[in-house]
Amino acid sequence: MTEKQFNVGIVGYGLSAKVFHIPFIQLTPSLKLHSIVQRTPKPGNSAPEDYPDLKHYTASEDLIADPDVDVVVLCTPPNTHYPLTRSALLNNKHVLVEKPFVPTSSEADELTALARQQKRVLCVYQNRRWDSDFLTVQNLLKEDKLGRIVEFETHFDRLRLTAPPKGSTWKAGLKMDEAGGVLYDLGSHLLDQVFVLFGMPDGVTGRFVNQREGRLVTGDGTDEQEPDSVTAILSYKNKGLLVFVRAGVACVETRQMRFWVRGTKGSYHKSGLDPQEDHLRAGGKATDTDFGKESEDRFGRLCIVGGDGKVEDQVCPTVEPETYVRFYHLFAQAVASGKEEGVPVPASQAAQVLRIIEAVRESAKTGSEVAPQA
């Protein structure tokens, strides 16, 4: 029996669509790339030129209203996600939304409820759940290699002392109230991974910095107080665990820290980012034999307490990558079943991560630890 194919419409034709979505849709047998929205195609950057056999639109609502489209993938700036997702659900489409999902947890809750009402799948593209370094951390915790975790550090640091031109991209133009800035862009990845590992924290402390100018800021919504870097501490009282989340632009390192996990039986130290994004940006394909695989010189280090009580330092090979192909495989299965429990990143979980983000923002304003809203 032939597997049913679902027609997929892409809204937006920037890096996200070209690198992180279209190639994986094309590798998923039950999904068929059907149509693309690009507002202003230009020579050298034209969806109609690149995909002449597809349907093409210049307005999002036209694609969303197309009765032949089963699935809408939103690759637009985050301040557009709420109205477009709502419209797509009301038009009985399954929806995949790029991260950051929406600006607020209340909007996320509303869309989650609407998807259930419409009996449609709503998923958020938190693809870094399928980074091989994160899967390595999950495996170490599952196998209890590190014992009880007492401290967990997760970083997304870079050396970028010159700010991008204002408005050059949505990342350089949107404020936090519109789901812009470092907390929503990079912080949503880091906090999502922490949520997967440990769940909701009991308390959150956040500090915002403009590292380029050397100022602590509050993130109060004004241009003057927007941060380019963030540090958050998440506390888990019943676990006796502190989680440190950091993203900065003034980090001078040859190998940027990614994870440092400390437990009662061992610790894991990992630097460098998962290679999938760089591979794809460089023109590589997910079908390449080395896609997602780290070279040995990029493996992490594992320190374990031996039987004699001495600490042993050893290389910790990164696990075999599942890659972002796995995400799309799971998403396609959820679309076929129509069941929320099969969604790889449910909107309800993205709403929880947004509650942590909101607690970070409140703490940065007040200077106090904040309990995320239930």
Image (cartoon, rainbow, N blue to C red):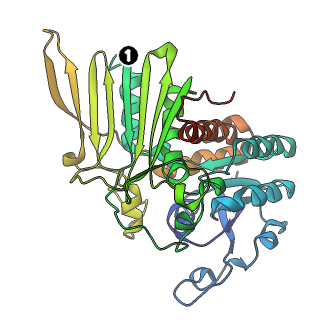
- Please state which of residues 354 and 228 is positioned toward the viewer in this rendering: 228
> Image quarter for residue 65?
bottom right
Judging depth in this view, the residue of 360 and 128 nearest the camera is 360
Residues 175 and 277: in front is 175
Within 10 Å of disc 1 (Cα), the crowding (few <14, some 14-19, many 20+) is: some
- Residue 312 visible from this viewpoint: yes
Quarter of the image where the C terminus is located? top right
Q: Position of residue 371 (x, y in %)?
A: 61, 27
Quarter occupied by residue 17: bottom right
Q: Position of residue 269 (x, y in %)?
A: 27, 35
Q: Position of residue 341 (x, y in %)?
A: 69, 34
Mark 1: which amino acid? Arg
Residue drawn at 40 percent across, 43 percent down: 246
In what element is the residue under mark 1? Answer: loop
Query: Left or right: where does residue 14 sit relative to residue 59?
Result: left
Q: Which residue is mark 1?
A: 148
Q: Residue at x 62, y 54 (%)?
A: 221
